[in-house]
Amino acid sequence: MPHFQWQDGQTLLLHCHVQPKASRDVLVGLYGERLKVQISAPPVDGKANKHLLKYIAKEFGVAKARVSLIRGESSRQKTLAIVDPQKLPAAAQITRP
């Protein structure tokens, strides 16, 4: 499975490997076939997921409401949907069709 997939040309499905409780928030690059994302929030009471969505929204230039968790709520392997991303971070290595 690729680390990203465009749906309808407007929604980006991003397959991530998330490392919570890191020293900083950063898009690391590829981890296998997923994008590795380190976030500083701990994996307690959904804090890491909320922080992840906020961070991804900032990195892709969209409002928080445009990012949603599709799969992997309690796993490090997550799939996110980003509606109409305004910018594509270099670490994501994404080319738009």
Image (spheres, grey):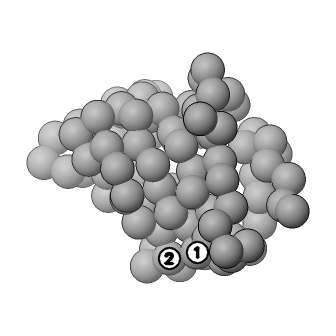
Mark 1 Cα-neighbour bin, 10 Å: few <14, some 14–19, many ≥20: many
- Residue 91 in the image, given as x and y percentages of width and height: 75, 39
- Residue 9 in the image, given as x and y percentages of width and height: 73, 73
Residue 50, by quadrant, is: bottom left
What kind of element bears circle 1?
A: strand
Q: Give the residue type at disc 1.
A: Val
Q: How many marks?
A: 2
Q: Are marks 1 and 2 in contact (CB under 8 Å)?
A: yes
- Residue 36 in the image, given as x and y percentages of width and height: 57, 31
Residue 97, by quadrant, is: bottom right
The one of 14 and 87 positioned closer to us in this rendering: 14
Q: Residue at x 43, y 59 (%)?
A: 53
From the viewer's perspective, is 22 left or right of 24? left
Using the image, determine if residue 42 lies above or below residue 84.
above
Q: Which residue is mark 2?
A: 66
Q: Residue at x 63, y 28 (%)?
A: 33
Q: Residue at x 51, y 39 (%)?
A: 16
How far apart in space, not on screen, are marks 1 and 2 (Cα)?
5 Å
Q: Give the residue type at disc 2.
A: Arg
Mark 2 Cα-neighbour bin, 10 Å: few <14, some 14–19, many ≥20: some
**Visible residue check, residue 24:** no
The one of 30 and 33 positioned closer to us in this rendering: 33
Q: Which residue is mark 1?
A: 83
**Visible residue check, residue 92:** yes
- Residue 44 in the image, given as x and y percentages of width and height: 16, 41
Where, quadrant-wise, is the N terminus in this rendering?
top right
